[in-house]
Amino acid sequence: MTRSEVSRELTGNPAGRGQAVGVVARLAAAPVLPAEVPAPGPADAEVAVAALGSVVADLRARAEGLSGVARDILDTQVAMAEDPALMAGVRDAVARGRPAAWALHDAFEVHVAALAALGGYLGERAGDLVDLRDRAIAAVLGVPSPGVPVRAEPFVLVSTDLAPADTVTLDPSKVVAIVTAKGGPTSHTAILARALGIPAVVGCAEAESLVDGDLVVVDGTRGVVVVSPDDSLVDQVSRAAVAVPALHHGPGSTSDGHPVRLLLNVGGPLDDVVDAEGVGLFRTEFLFLDRTEAPSREEQRRVYGEVFASFGGRPVVVRTLDAGADKPLPFANSDDEPNPALGVRGYRVARRRPELLADQLAAIADAAASHGTDVRVMAPMIATAAEAREFADLARSFGFSQVGVMIEIPAAALRADEVLAEVDFVSIGTNDLAQYTFAADRVLGDLGALLDPWQPALLDLIALVAEAGRRAGKPVGVCGEAAGDPALAPVLVGLGVTSLSMSAPALPHVRAALREHTLAECTALARRAH
């Protein structure tokens, strides 16, 4: 372990909440092409294609047993590696006289540059291609594949960037935190770190100065890395890491017993449903992405049933298909929308393809009946009370007794009384509500400060909806990322929110945070925050 005499702080983007302390272990480096380029052999095209095939096989093996967002990301990376245009580029490069490893490098560079030029969410996918390239080149050169080091003791993983193939298989008992020099708040590293409950700081340029053995404290909530922390900070973080899991049981409540339902956000079948009171947001997009046609009603019924069976008597809130914008589907969206986030997405897709929503509601109803689960449905991207009424009427015609909508558009928040008059509950999606309130693209890292859930204007809108819920005597939940922030959770409860839905790793931390405050203290915190 290396300790310098003076502590220093590095800053980046907060990407995975919480704090952790540990020693640095850097990711194994990417392979470097030899300076001298050899003449290509007669089978170099096949060698290069076989190397890509070995990478695909490895990714498929890593994907086995995974579910939700981790599985989705690996499946997408497999699709990237199997892109016919990429394969054709490799063969063309060999035909031009480039040997296998160089042909892979050249072919990937074209696609990497094209994605990077797009910026935003798609630009961040360029890193996924770079990872595929490096793994394939390593296979050709016969050198170790870049990846996570193997250590006997827990460590803080530090790298320039982190590939999905590495991130999805991280063991949180070994990798206590992540620090990367590149990446924004919507990079795969950030998404997966949050899903795994690993504190993470991304886009920390000075991460390149960290070396194996450095002792660091990673604060993923603030986006700060403390190098050579003093003993008091190390003790404080270490004690917190031990204390919080001990509170991982029981229903959510404030210290004086005010109930707050703590629910899960899920994106597919789960291996472990943990100690949650149900599902507050079952994202169904995983079943539709990367397809040219919608899944059949029978396939949907089977997959939904797998999730319902996991939760027994606990309620499961299913969000109907939220396609469009950053989740385009060829059979549901148009390619010619200049501003997809402001176009036909979410519930609006049903205007063009009403059979998609009808088939999905039928499949959900069938699956719920088969498993006897308390299933509720809610629609995304509702703007008006008329849309809420339209969805509620349709959902009730399929037999659902509990119907809700998401509040993600300021218009719906401002008219929450009228929206709540049409449905049984509402759930606030803070990511999209912030996006539309501040006119700031939620996937653009440069605008991250505007999307901060602590923004007073966003809290004002949440308060409006919560107050409308109190008047109507109906539940108002939050299922955006803000719900999993232990510091913000008491504020949301103080505003009047009745349930919080989050990723599984965040749940014990939120539960612990609520138990540190009475309802009156939560109310006081909320009053000061907005």
Image (tube, rainbow, N blue to C red):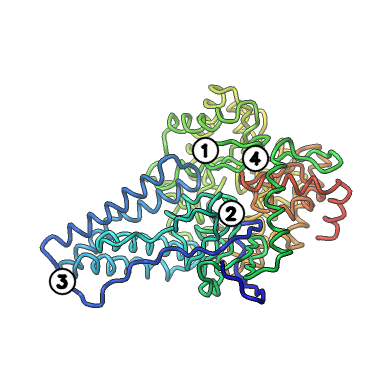
Mark 1 vs mark 2, foreground winner is 2
Q: Is residue 24 above or below residue 319?
A: below
Name the quadrant of the N terminus: bottom right
Residue 272 image-quadrant placement: top right
* CA gap, disc 3 and disc 1: 52 Å
Residue 20: % across, % down: 63, 58
Tell me the residue that label 2 is attached to: 198
Specify few, some or many for label 3: CA neighbours under 10 Å numbering under 14, 14-19, or 20 or more.
some
State which mark lies toward you, 4 or 3. Answer: 3
Q: Is residue 435 left or right of residue 157?
A: right
Give amino acid for label 2. Answer: Ile
Q: Of the residues tagged 4 and 2, which is closer to the observer? A: 2
Q: Secondary structure at mark 3?
A: loop
Of labels 4 and 1, earlier in sequence is: 4
- Going from the N terminus, do you reach mark 3 or mark 2 first? 3
Labelled disc at residue 357 = 1
Q: CA distance from mark 1 to mark 2?
A: 36 Å
293 vs 18, left or right, is: left
What SS does tag 1 mark?
A: helix
Looking at the picture, tell me which residue is in the foreground, 119 or 44.
Answer: 44
Q: Earlier in the sequence, mark 4 or mark 2?
A: 2
Callout 4 amino acid: Gly
Binning the other alpha carbons within 10 Å of mark 2 as few (below 14), some (14 to 19) or many (20 upward) gives many
Q: Which mark is residue 280?
A: 4
Task: Name the residue rendered at 65%, 73% in the picture.
Answer: 9
Quadrant (top left/top right/bottom left/bottom right) for the C terminus: bottom right
**Residue drawn at (59%, 64%) of the image:** 201
Check residue 97 in the rendering and tell me which mark sits there, or answer none: 3
Numbered badge on residue 139:
none
Q: Residue furthest front?
A: 1
Q: Earlier in the sequence, mark 4 or mark 3?
A: 3
